[in-house]
């Protein structure tokens, strides 16, 4: 068996797939969801970014269905990664897959990051999702009710509450099988703890009914933790996660040439602001903030060449650099991809100088990797929940030992960027024992 994860943005693909890499499976994140692009990857898990977050619902649905049709093979299971705060076209994408893959097991909870589900409604650190800045920014006046959102795209739903889930065993599998036999198209599963998601993973991975999973990184990592998930080849040939990480650090030590680390931040969320503040304070890093007007106009802007030179001069000193997108009165969340692409174009001439890249926001990460000609990355390790480290799958002619960290915008602890920077400098930070996951904020990019 193998797993295909279909995600709507790049950081989401990585944070969903990293649990499998941590469990020792070879895991690849790809910027293109095509059989031709992935034929060369002998991976147990493929996470394909369809880049549909900002598309119309109809186009997102079409592209998502096409990805599964192109990449489905015998023995490959499907996981539709959705944002734990329900951003994007997730309902339309699930509807497009349901007719092809069977019953949708919908469980977006990610308890490790404060996202839970009760009565089919998302709670963020115990408070309704509707009260968060992230939801208000794009869904003002709309209820964050999974049943209603799936009904809008024509899917019939059933509810599995926490008490029924916690029965576990044969009683749980019988409940789910009965839902599937009834013709219901989506089963919404409440979950408040990682143990709840583990119970769901144990039940559904053993069922014979046609089904697929719909969730965030929370359910994915519980599925990844199950013993004997894939075939014997995976158990025999994959190295344990700890051994892989030790080998990776040894390789980095041999290849370290004191090249600079670039931290690209496309998110304007309050979470990202706190993370940047800690990074500046603890790492003493230089910071440049590019005015959005420069990015909107691109090469036509009078200051474009000066900004490109300024970035190059900063990196030429071999000092690490924090590079951010500014904000002005013309700010529009829908322009995230445009601004990210322009930021990547400013960096592209200097990309060969980098020893490490940290990209906050799926659109930011995708834009930079695309500009650099990197079509896929193999995941190596997880720094904290949702913060993944990878390396180019094919040898990168520019920087063959480049290490890439991706993180969603309004996501992670205040410690996340500093911990990523420490990792790339071969001194992984100790986990913050008392640090609570940060709440969702207002941002250009957010996926979890």
Image (spheres, helix red, strand yellow):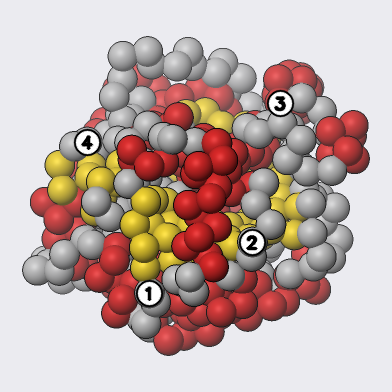
Mark 3 or 2, closer to the camera: 2
Which residue appears at 37% of the width and 82% of the height? 154
Q: Earlier in the sequence, mark 3 or mark 2?
A: 2
Query: Label 1 belongs to which residue?
Result: 156
Mark 4 or 2, closer to the camera: 2
With 225 as the anchor, is 441 left or right in this view? left
With 275 as the anchor, is 16 left or right in this view? right
With 347 as the anchor, is 133 left or right in this view? left
Q: Earlier in the sequence, mark 4 or mark 2?
A: 4
Label 4 vs label 2: CA separation?
Answer: 34 Å
Q: Which mark is residue 209?
A: 2
Q: Nearer the viewer, residue 109 or 40?
A: 109
Q: Which mark is residue 125?
A: 4
Label 4 vs label 3: CA separation?
Answer: 30 Å
Which residue appears at 55% of the width and 36% of the height? 169
With 50 as the anchor, is 52 left or right in this view? left
Q: Which mark is residue 377?
A: none
Mark 3 or 1, closer to the camera: 1
Q: Nearer the viewer, residue 117 or 370?
A: 117
Query: Label 3 belongs to which residue?
Result: 241
Number of other residues with Cα within 10 Å of mark 1, as a class: few under 14, some 14 to 19, many 20 or more: some
Residue 315 shows in the view: no
Q: Nearer the viewer, residue 80 or 53?
A: 80
Label 3 vs label 1: CA separation?
Answer: 40 Å
| Residue 82 percent coordinates (x, y) | 44, 58
Where is residue 328, by image quadrant?
A: bottom left
């Amino acid at each position: 068996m193998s797993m295909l994860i279909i995600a709507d943005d790049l950081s989401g693909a990585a944070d969903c797939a990293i649990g499998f890499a941590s469990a020792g499976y070879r895991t690849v994140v790809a910027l293109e969801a095509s059989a031709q692009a992935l034929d060369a990857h002998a991976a147990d898990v493929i996470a394909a970014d369809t880049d549909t977050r900002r598309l119309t619902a109809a186009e997102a649905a079409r592209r998502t269905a096409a990805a599964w049709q192109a990449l489905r093979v015998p023995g490959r299971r499907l996981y539709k990664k959705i944002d734990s705060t329900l951003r994007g076209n997730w309902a339309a994408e699930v509807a497009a897959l349901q007719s092809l893959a069977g019953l949708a097991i919908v469980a977006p909870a990610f308890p490790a990051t404060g996202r839970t589900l009760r009565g089919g409604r998302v709670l963020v650190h115990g408070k309704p999702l509707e009260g968060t800045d992230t939801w208000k920014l794009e869904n003002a006046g709309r209820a964050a009710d999974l049943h209603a959102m799936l009904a809008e795209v024509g899917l019939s739903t059933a509810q599995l509450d926490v008490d029924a889930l916690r029965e576990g065993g044969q009683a749980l599998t019988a409940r789910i099988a009965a839902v599937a036999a009834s013709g219901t198209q989506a089963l919404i599963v409440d979950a408040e703890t990682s143990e709840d998601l583990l119970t769901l993973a144990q039940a559904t991975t053993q069922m014979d009914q046609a089904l697929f999973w719909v969730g965030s990184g929370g359910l994915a990592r519980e599925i990844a933790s199950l013993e004997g998930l894939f075939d014997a080849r995976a158990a025999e040939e994959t190295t344990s996660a700890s051994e892989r990480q030790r080998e990776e650090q040894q390789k980095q030590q041999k290849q370290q040439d004191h090249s600079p680390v670039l931290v690209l931040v496309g998110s304007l969320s309050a979470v990202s602001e706190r993370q940047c503040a800690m990074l500046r304070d603890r790492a003493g890093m230089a910071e440049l903030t590019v005015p959005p007007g420069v990015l909107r106009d691109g090469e036509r802007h009078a200051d474009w060449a000066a900004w490109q030179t300024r970035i190059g001069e900063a990196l030429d000193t071999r000092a690490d650099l924090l590079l951010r997108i500014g904000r002005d009165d013309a700010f529009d969340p829908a322009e995230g991809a445009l601004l990210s692409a322009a930021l990547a174009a400013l960096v592209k001439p200097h990309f060969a100088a980098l020893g490490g890249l940290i990209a906050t926001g799926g659109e930011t990460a995708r834009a930079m990797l695309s500009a650099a000609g990197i079509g896929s990355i193999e995941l190596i390790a997880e720094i904290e929940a949702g913060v993944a480290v990878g390396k180019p799958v094919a040898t990168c002619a520019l920087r063959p030992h480049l290490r890439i960290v991706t993180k969603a915008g309004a996501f992670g602890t205040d410690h996340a960027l500093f911990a990523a920077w420490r990792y790339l400098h071969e001194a992984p930070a100790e986990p913050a024992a008392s640090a609570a996951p940060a709440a969702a904020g207002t941002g250009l990019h957010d996926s979890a």
